[in-house]
Image: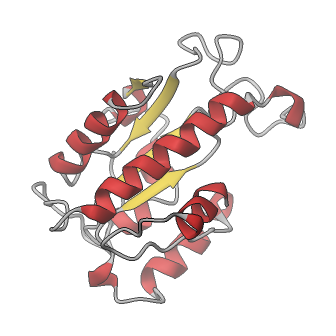
Amino acid sequence: LEVAEAFAKGKVKPKRSLLFVWHTGEEKGLLGSRYFADHPTVSRDSIVAQINIDMVGRGAATDLAAGSPTYLQLVGSRRLSTELGDLTETVNKSEKMPFTFDYAFDANGHPDNIYCRSDHYNYARYGIPVVFMTTGLHGDYHQVTDEPQYIDYPHMARVGQFVFDLASRVAGLDHRPVVDHEKPDPNGSCRQ
């Protein structure tokens, strides 16, 4: 909501429209994102990229072995569009406190299959370039112990700023991010 509000209050509007979508039913099989991707409120052809954020409030060394104040996992950023992946890296380098990206969960054949398990995939299956950002899979993931006092709010705010900056760059492009990898079958099964 903060990112959407920042765009709404911004003095400079991006060249492209932005659409903010909150999906439900991810844990039940990506139901909300599947429905939206199958029945978008705008022409699917007008959606040039999808930035997905989920579970970005953690990421410290106490949460994950690789965790730090700059930790951020990325999934899918180059699977369809090398350009989107490169742009994500470029924008990160311009941040006041750049993130250290962890691409481990994006590896082909990774046993956790994160690329196929989060809402971004329903866009990717239609050939829409995606980038998924998370600091998830910490020890409290899907546990009753995952409570607000463990959220690192300054870290989460930096993620929000990064998402704003990346979305601004994508929305300001004079072209769609180039899809230079094979598009999946929208009705096929996902393979990471």
Furthest toward the front, the residue is: 11
Which residue is situated farthest in the left direction here?
A: 180
Q: Indicate left or right for 144 with 23 as reference.
A: right
**Which quarter of the rendering shows the N terminus?**
bottom right
The vertical placement of 90 against 188, above or below, is above
Image location (x, y in percent) of residue 111: 45, 33
Q: Is residue 108 visible?
A: no
Quadrant showing the C terminus: top left
Q: Residue at x 31, y 41 (%)?
A: 88
Position in image of residue 139 (x %, y %) = 73, 23
Judging depth in this view, the residue of 190 and 17 nearest the camera is: 17
- Camera-side residue of 179 and 140: 179
Displayed quadrant of residue 167:
bottom left
Residue at 41 percent of width and 31 percent of height: 95
In terms of depth relative to the viewer, which is nearer, 188 or 140? 140
Image vertical order of residue 161 relative to residue 184, above or below: above
Relative placement, left or right, of 18 versus 156 is left
Instruction: Tell me if residue 136 can be seen.
Output: yes
Spot occupied by residue 102 in the image (x, y as percentages of width and height): 41, 24
